[in-house]
Image (cartoon, rainbow, N blue to C red):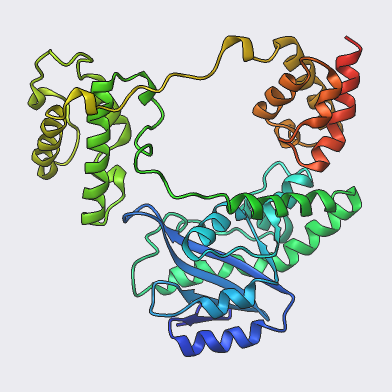
Amino acid sequence: MTTNYPSIYIDKQRKLDQLVKRIKPLKEIYFDMEVDNMYHYGTTISLIQLLVDETAYLIDVISDINLKGLLAALKPKLIVVHGSDFDLRMLHQKFDFAPSHIFDTMIAAQLAGKKAFGLAALVEQYFNVKLDKKYQRADWSIRPISEEMLYYAAKDTFFLPELKENLSRELSDLGRLSWQQEWCDHLIEVAQYYQKPDKETVWRIKGSHRFSSRQLNVLKEVWNWRDQQAKENNKPVHKIFNTKAMLHMISLIPSNQGKYITWEKLPLKTQSVLKTSLLETIIHAEKIPPENWPKRIKSTSHKTSSPDPKVVTILKETRDKIARKLNLPASLLASKDSIGHFAQLAKRSPKNINNGTSLMNWQKALLSKPWIEALSSK
């Protein structure tokens, strides 16, 4: 299979082994990948694209090939990628792989002060080329992959080398290359924090904190039912039962055990073929003894632990002033949560800000002293 850009489609081990040999002497590799997380159960890495010596190698991850040698060859390289956050997490979760070094062109664009930092926007800005993103949400598990989809997959990687050079030069002129490197190192580190979901708590989703123990019991059983149905039918969980609709259904359940429920009258917005099975799950949940129902988790937050609004305002205004001077989005310097964290530290003394851990070194270097000075002058 070929595309209009020089490319080689790899679905055989022999071809992959040949690519590994070509990669070993190189210092930089240009990387992209396509995943399927919208059409089937779970998330699957379907295709990995590597630009090597001006040829895009399209590696069919779903095919019967072993990626161990490839990943070992990639490990010490500088991986140039656009928007690495999701890719790094998936590579760690699926293959226990983490690169040693990356250069994320999206992060570089943000630090260079670009207002639009998506790959399509940058390619148009630097190269006057419009990328067609119509396959961004395509089903990449379909085999054989169409020629048009292969063309799409290959094309993006060809702009990464020059994009990296342009952005590196701009960051160097601005004195921000070290910021870029620290942020990229941070992304690699954070991606490895992943822990498998705890079956006993994964169903406690946003919005469930308001439910009674009875409602939580039904939610837990329905959650597990939905996951099992999605797995058996190889479909995303939201195509089995939408989360918003599920929470709405649970909210209609009387919180006290004694009240009778006519389940068939509840607005169960799911596929009719699954409705009977869902109703059986709900009825089964109602038969579970109350002493075995999940307990409500009380909030550990207290009003007394809230940061001083005046301190938050001072930190925010100081951050915003520095961001404007640097022509950067304020949230890039410190998020709302980070400001809350530092406001808490400053309760006893502004100098405690130096002990904060929610910012990278380059962010702290920009903000700590101005924050302390602003707070001390009030």
Q: Residue at x 70, y 11 (%)?
A: 309
Query: What x and y, as percent, mark residue 198?
Result: 40, 43
In this view, the residue in front, 300 or 365, is 300
The quarter of the picture where the C terminus appears is: top right
Whether residue 73 sits left or right of residue 134 in the image: it is: right
Query: What x and y, as percent, mark residue 308?
Result: 71, 11
Which residue reaches farthest front?
291
- Rendered image quadrant of residue 291: top left
Would residue 326 be visible to someone looking at this image? Answer: no
Counting the numbered discs, the total is 0
The quarter of the picture where the N terminus appears is: bottom left
- Rendered image quadrant of residue 372: top right
Residue 86 vs 258, above or below: the answer is below
Query: What x and y, as percent, mark residue 363?
Result: 80, 38
In this view, the residue in front, 164 or 259, is 259
Whether residue 343 sits left or right of residue 33 in the image: it is: right
Q: Residue at x 20, y 23 (%)?
A: 290
In this view, the residue in front, 126 or 159, is 159
Query: What x and y, as percent, mark residue 354?
Result: 83, 30
Would residue 77 be visible to someone looking at this image? Answer: yes
Q: Residue at x 38, y 39 (%)?
A: 202
Q: Residue at x 26, y 42 (%)?
A: 224
Whether residue 159 sits left or right of residue 191 in the image: it is: right
Residue 206 vs 137, above or below: the answer is above
Residue 279 vs 158, above or below: the answer is above
In this view, the residue in front, 117 or 12, is 12
